[in-house]
Amino acid sequence: MLNLYDKLVMDSAAINAEAKARRKYYKHIGELKEDHAKVAILFRTVPNEPENCLVIGPKFLSDIQHNDFMKALESPEGQASFELGTYLARQKFSDGTNMLAILHADNFIKKMKTKDIIVTYGPGDEGKIALDKLNQMIADEKGISISELAVKDEKPKEKKSNKKANAKETAKN
């Protein structure tokens, strides 16, 4: 026969397991392999560096920035985005500043090895996968290489004129 303490422990364990099962999991969330610190994955790969990714530690943001960031991450648009960083480039903090620009300017974005990031998509160990393995699965599914997963700059590059202005001619005009 179980004593009252054992029953309470069992009940709390059942409640915790039930809460974990009902917990909502979001895309773009992971943890560091080494110490399990929570990270948000902005870009799963870096151009010309498919073994690296860009992440932030949301806990380092101010309370207001953290709340704004999490609203963006959890939004339907944030969840639908292939790369969170491309969505954040179009979002603003409540003070009107661009999210991605401020995260970059204030040095919150860190480059990490994809093998050192664990993506969390469900409860327990079954709901985790190393980012390098996830990237390989996505690349295989798309029939491309991992390096082709990186976001490319879609802005046309401006051509610079090779002609140097002649100071004497400019002064005559």
Image (spheres, rainbow, N blue to C red):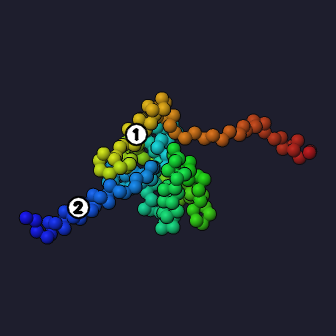
Query: Could you tell me if residue 101 is visible in this image?
Result: no
Q: If the image is split into quadrants, where does the N terminus sit?
A: bottom left
Which residue is farthest left?
Answer: 1
Which residue is farthest right?
Answer: 172
Q: Which residue is mark 2?
A: 13
Residue 164, quarter of the rendered image: top right
Q: Residue, x 44% and y 49% (percent of image)?
A: 27
Q: Position of residue 66 (x, y in %)?
A: 48, 63
Q: Position of residue 131 (x, y in %)?
A: 40, 43
Residue 20, quarter of the rendered image: bottom left
Q: Which residue is mark 1?
A: 134
- The kind of residue on which mark 2 rests is Ala
Q: Residue, x 92% and y 45% (percent of image)?
A: 173
Q: Residue, x 40% and y 53% (percent of image)?
A: 25
Q: Secondary structure at mark 2?
A: helix
Q: Give the camera-side residue of 42 and 15.
A: 15
Q: Position of residue 36 (x, y in %)?
A: 33, 54
Q: Give the camera-side residue of 160 and 61.
A: 61
